Image (spheres, helix red, strand yellow):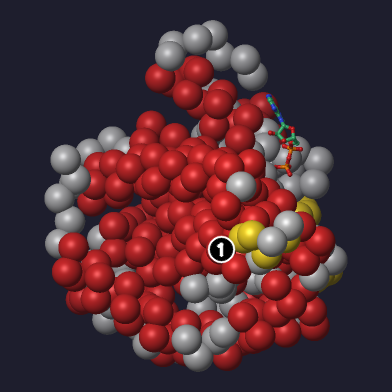
Amino acid sequence: MFSHDVEALNAIREGVRSLCANFDAAYWRGVDERKEFPEAFVTELTEAGWLAAMIPEEYGGSGLGLTEASVILEEVNRCGGNSGTVHGQMYNMFTLLRHGSEEQKRKFLPRIAAGELRLQSMAVTEPTTGTDTTKIKTTAVKRGDKYVVNGQKVWISRIQHSDLMILLARTTPLAEVKKKVDGMSIFLVDLAAAIGNGMSVQPIANMVNHETNELFFDNLELPADSLIGEEGKGFRYILDGLNAERTLIAAECIGDGRWFIDKASQYAREREVFGRPIGQNQGVQFPIAEAHIEVEAADLMRWRACHEYDAGQPAGASANMAKYLAAKASWEAANVCLQTHGGFGFASEYDVERKFRETRLYQVAPISTNLILSYVSEHLLELPRSF
Ligand SMILES: Cc1cc2nc3c(=O)[nH]c(=O)nc-3n(C[C@H](O)[C@H](O)[C@H](O)COP(=O)(O)OP(=O)(O)OC[C@H]3O[C@@H](n4cnc5c(N)ncnc54)[C@H](O)[C@@H]3O)c2cc1C
């Protein structure tokens, strides 16, 4: 049904696995405990070219599809790592590639592909509006050859380890647009120039080792050529990139799910209680088997989304459903893995509690489960719009 070049995908898997072998469980546990950004891992993955997988060859990338990109992120998580530290670059790049001017693309994409610049951040979410994105209050007002930005963002990831950020701001007040999705624009922000000159960053301590921040804009001046695409169409551009983002997150969850199932199965084979391996009890083995079935089923939807996306077909339904199913399956696998480990599941040295926290995020970000259910209800089942 979904034809892939299995050998080529296996070669990618092996390449990513051999890189990940340099960053073992102790490495990820260490950065998690110290709340450090996994700089060495991100640098090596970038320098090896994996994050440039989807940048077209004419701009210095590998020109691969979403299918291949999804395998890269899946393998990072399958090996026990955290793709959440790097995935932003893969999907933020789409916005620039699809909607940037030729000049912007020539200026930035080759340097991103070469690892000289990182485009790891996208600032959409705001503290007072949450998922109701069209109500964002951050504004960008054109003054001469500049835009002046004021407002606030929250949960903006990897700012401290990125050179560039895509910013969504209102350029026409909500009251003055015909459709609420109009009047927002996106800008490519040079973070080194902005921080301390109208933009400030407040890190948010959080449950996972995820570098994420609150941003404040106080008359930040952006050169007019920071605008990506046409003024007023920014929200549509962001929506355009979401199918890729959701599919990639689904693949990461598949990687997590498989890691949990391997880990649970291995422990259940080895741990002996009452004179036999705990995995000999059906009460222990059935939940692992069930989680495995759920992960494999979710994976089929992930391939469908990849296939549709790479074939240029509408992929919204599959991408959303893949993200929903995979996030749910990986969370269920995490829960089973923790339960299988009993008390040891709570000990950091087993890595289960860390991955458990990491995979939980995907029920909430980058889109919460309810919002996917809402999308499916409204757009696929033609149920009345609820908000
Ligand atoms: C670690 C982390 C990293 C993040 N990184 C980024 C980033 O880099 N850039 C960025 O822009 N954002 C980022 N986010 C923000 C993330 O996308 C949002 O947290 C997410 O979309 C949910 O929005 P919210 O937190 O404002 O929840 P809210 O919109 O306040 O919703 C709260 C809860 O209510 C539910 N809900 C709300 N409205 C409805 C409704 N009408 N029907 C049913 N349920 C509803 C939601 O599903 C959710 O469960 C990040 C978040 C986290 C936690």
Q: In this view, does 310 lie above or below 193?
A: above
Q: Is residue 13 found left or right of 19 in the rendered image? A: left
**The image quarter in which residue 248 lies:** bottom left
Q: Where is residue 5 in the image (x, y as percent from the top left)?
A: 15, 62
Residue type at mark 1 is Arg
Q: Is residue 57 found left or right of 210 in the rendered image? A: left
Q: Is mark 1 on a helix, strand or loop?
A: helix
| Residue 83 visible in this rendered orientation of the protein | no
Name the foreground residue: 89 vs 340. 340
Residue sitting at x 69%, y 61%: 275
Q: In this view, does 21 lie above or below 233?
A: below
Tell me which image quadrant ligand 1 sits in: top right
Looking at the rendered image, the quarter that the N terminus falls into is top left
Q: Is residue 56 found left or right of 193 in the rendered image? A: left
Q: Where is residue 336 in the image (x, y as percent from the top left)?
A: 64, 49
Q: Where is residue 107 in the image (x, y as percent from the top left)?
A: 37, 79
| Residue 308 visible in this rendered orientation of the protein | yes
Q: Is residue 214 above or below residue 59?
A: above
Residue sitting at x 56%, y 14%: 385
Task: Look at mark 1 in the image and give the residue it sits on.
Answer: 269
